[in-house]
Amino acid sequence: MKVTFLGTGTSQGVPVIGCSCMVCQSLDFRDKRFRTSAHIEVEQTSLVVDTGPDFRMQMLRAGIKKLDAVLFTHEHKDHTAGLDDIRPYNFSQQRDMPVFGRKRVLDQLQREYSYIFSDKKYPGVPQVNCIEIDEHPFHVNGIGITPIPVLHYKLPVLGFRIGDFSYITDANFIPEESYALLEGTEILVINALQKESHISHFTLDQAIDQAIKIGAKRTYFTHISHRLGKHQDVEKELPEGIFLAYDGLELTLA
């Protein structure tokens, strides 16, 4: 399995428009963050988790020429706004794109992208095959995927586990039942927004506590705000085995 962090930033990305803080002015490439998304390649199946506003540039930068399915964690715009840009994959692969999400998420997509689902479609619109999922495991091309229910304040969000890799974004609460689903995870990705308290995201300290409780061999933080601090500084504060992810980082799992 190969995991590529397509984006590791929060909803505004980093740098933030109009901001002159030290993070937004940083020349370190690790402080340049597209909206949060990940590419997972396993047994020649190519999956993307979330298609945010930067989806086009993320896929070009990563050189991803094949895409088998999209998994949506939830319906917020910073995770769905790039759906239209699946069109080149429709054209090159000559098939509809399977899109997996909860019913609430798929309903939201149908409202926001009504032209995709219109009875009289404009030529060239994205072609999607919406597949409803819930909290039960499902498969994509024979690859087993286990949803991990978490809460983003009061909004239900799904993380995903594939093999020994677990990915959670946009959360500030993990139910006890979900910890059981995370047992044995070797590589964990979880959100760590900033150091100050936040209504719907784990802070840095809370994310560290979660990482220690889950006990993965390696944990990578994502969905990072410019308020967290510069990458090179924050990394020095982290316990052993815990790291900040950055755009373009690639992980390989046996």
Image: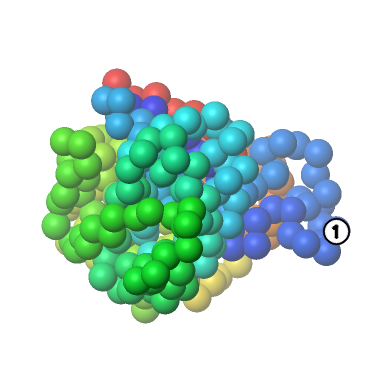
Q: Residue at coordinates 34% horizontally, 48% vertically from top-left?
A: 97
Residue farthest top in this picture:
254
Q: Which residue is mark 1?
A: 20
- Residue situated in front as seen by the camera: 130 or 42: 130
In the image, residue 61 lies at what x, y percent? 61, 34
Give residue 91's quadrant in the image. Answer: top left
Judging depth in this view, the residue of 248 and 23 nearest the camera is 248
Disc tally is: 1
In the displayed structure, 90 sits above or below 113; it is above
Q: Quadrant of the C terminus?
A: top left
Q: x and y percent of residue 242 in the render? A: 47, 39
Residue in view at x 33 percent, y 43 percent: 95
Looking at the picture, how far across and down is residue 147, in whole percent? 23, 54
**Which type of secondary structure does the marked residue at label 1 adopt?**
loop
Residue occupying the point 44% across, 55% down: 126
What residue appears at the point 78 percent right and 52 percent down from the top-left corner? 24
Q: Percent from the top left, x then y, of residue 232? A: 69, 38
Q: Is residue 60 above or below residue 55?
A: above
Q: Is residue 246 above or below residue 223?
A: above
Q: Amino acid at mark 1?
A: Ser
